[in-house]
Amino acid sequence: MLPRSMLLTAALLLFLYFSPLLRSGVTWITWQLAAAIGALSILTYALPYLVVSILPPQNLKKKYDADWAFVTGSSSGIGRALAERLALQGVNIVLVALDDQLLKDTHAALTNQFPQLKFRAVGADLSVSDGSYMTAIAQATKDIHVSLVFNNAGYMVTGFFRQVPLNKHLANIECNTVSAVRITHHFFQRMVDSKRKGAIVFTSSVAGYIPSPFATGYGATKAFLSSFAASLAVEARHYGVDICAVHPSPVNSRFLDKADKLDSLEFTSQFAYRPEDLPDDIFRTVGRAVWRDLGGFALVARGVTKLIDYNALATIFSLTAHNMKDWKMATQRSGPKS
């Protein structure tokens, strides 16, 4: 019988002899596993996207037997484009926007363009914290059944978080997210009670899935909308109500009127779409996908998040942001505001 020392020596020699092969085997398995995970991530994103892309835009009036739609932010931009496309499908529309001349002009224009349809204008400031706008909304819709809800209103507040007054941040959060929750709760409950099909659509943003320095509230509110939509979609499908959130690429509209000019916004505006280019893609998506990125910029941004983990992306941003032109411009402004 061989001494234990010889057995240990032999085992060590065998390990040293085969270790390069073992290391190469482990390395090969690791790379294959990483490739499989990457392929699965890309495939599960690309396949549903491509399927929806080749399908035609849907007639939402027919799909949901819809007489009325409800669109926030409908006096201009994406909201107005949605209203016009819904009207072309024969849907009556409740137009919700700030109570200003622009809303009056939009209401008049649509009424003249589609005399066979009904349009109700509801002037409402969705940024007020007490939610009092819901009284006007409930009153304007109490005698109709709304089958289609488009939570589209929103705006961006730019600048260093600490330099923007708190009430301005809170108003932005109210408009971009809380008002959508209030409106969704109101109409979703009515859809369920009526036992009729319906759809609720949220206009989210690319900013919801990438770090958004200098517009911290905007990115956070859009991330909330997308997550809220995805979670609610699971509950709502059982009742015949489809929920989805769309992430458009930058759009040429009045959306940035309230925002300070940023170099990054000027850059992305080069890739901006016209508002009227979006409704077909949105109508193509409803009931077929829970989330959908719209436009080249959104697809590129999503691709970056597929390649680089969000935590790593945020770290890279935090280490390099001080070199950005927007950072330097912001630091040249006055000190903190209360």
Image: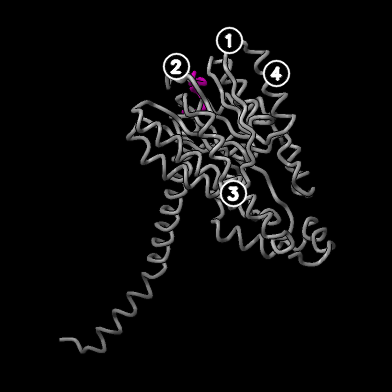
Image spot of residue 189 (x, y percent): 40, 37
Q: Are marks 3 and 4 in contact (CB under 8 Å)?
A: no
Q: Which residue is mark 3?
A: 174
Identify the residue at horizontal 58%, vertical 15% (top origin).
88
Comparing labels 2 and 4, the label whose residue is closer to the camera:
4
Instruction: Return the mark for residue 335.
Output: none
Look at the numbered disc 3 and give the secondary structure of its residue.
helix
Q: Amino acid at mark 1?
A: Gln
Of the image marks 3 and 4, the number of the one nearer the N terminus: 4
Q: CA distance from mark 3 to mark 4?
A: 29 Å
Q: Does the image show residue 215?
A: yes
Query: Is 273 positioned to the left or the right of 21 in the image?
Result: right
Q: Which residue is mark 1?
A: 116
Q: Which residue is mark 2?
A: 62
Residue 109 badge: 4
Query: Label 1 vs label 4: CA separation?
Result: 13 Å
> Which quarter of the figure is the N terminus placed in?
bottom left
Q: Where is residue 40 shown, x and y percent of the image? A: 43, 44
- Percent coordinates x, y for residue 91 in the rendering: 53, 18
Which of these two is toward me, 271 or 10?
A: 271
